[in-house]
């Protein structure tokens, strides 16, 4: 939790050091990870629902 707080508080400095393109690439990658997790959860929910019928 403390690491997250430090990263969030120093986000501006991190962005300046790594560059705009790197930040954009990281945002896209994390978006894809989040989408994959949500699809996995959705499919698992459908699977559980289908077995209850």
Image: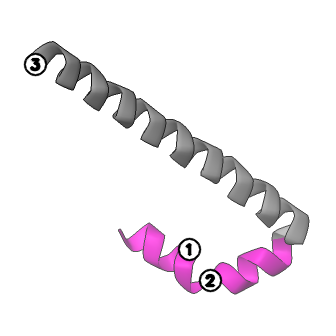
Residue 15, percent from left and from top:
77, 76
- In terms of sequence position, does the residue under pointer 2 or pointer 3 come before the other? 2
* SS under mark 1: helix
Are the residues tagged 2 and 1 within 8 Å (C-beta)?
yes
Residue at the disc numbered 1 = 7
Q: Which quarter of the rendered picture does the C terminus lie within? A: top left
Residue 43 figure quarter: top left
Q: Position of residue 19 (x, y in %)?
A: 88, 71
At which x and y percent is residue 10? 62, 83
Q: Nearer the viewer, residue 31 or 21?
A: 31
Up/down of 28 relative to 4, above or below: above
Question: How far is mark 2 from mark 3, CA to CA?
Answer: 48 Å
Tell me if 13 is positioned left or right of 17 in this view. Answer: left
Q: Which residues are magenta?
A: 1-17
User: Nearer the N terminus, badge 1 or badge 3?
Assistant: 1
Q: CA distance from mark 1 to mark 3?
A: 43 Å
Residue drawn at x 37%, y 35% is: 42
Tag 3 residue? 52
Instruction: Sort mark 3 into few (<14), some (14-19) or many (20+) by Cα contacts within 10 Å.
Output: few
- Residue identifier under label 2: 10
Q: Is residue 20 magenta?
A: no
Q: Secondary structure at mark 2?
A: loop
Give how far across and how far down residue 44 sits, in percent.
Answer: 31, 26
Q: Residue at x 55, y 44 (%)?
A: 35
């Amino acid at each position: 939790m403390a690491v997250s707080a430090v990263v969030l508080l120093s986000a501006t400095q991190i962005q300046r050091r790594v560059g705009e393109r790197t930040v954009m690439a990281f945002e896209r990658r994390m978006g894809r990870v989040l989408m994959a997790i949500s699809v996995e959860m959705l499919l698992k929910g459908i699977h559980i629902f289908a077995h209850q019928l």
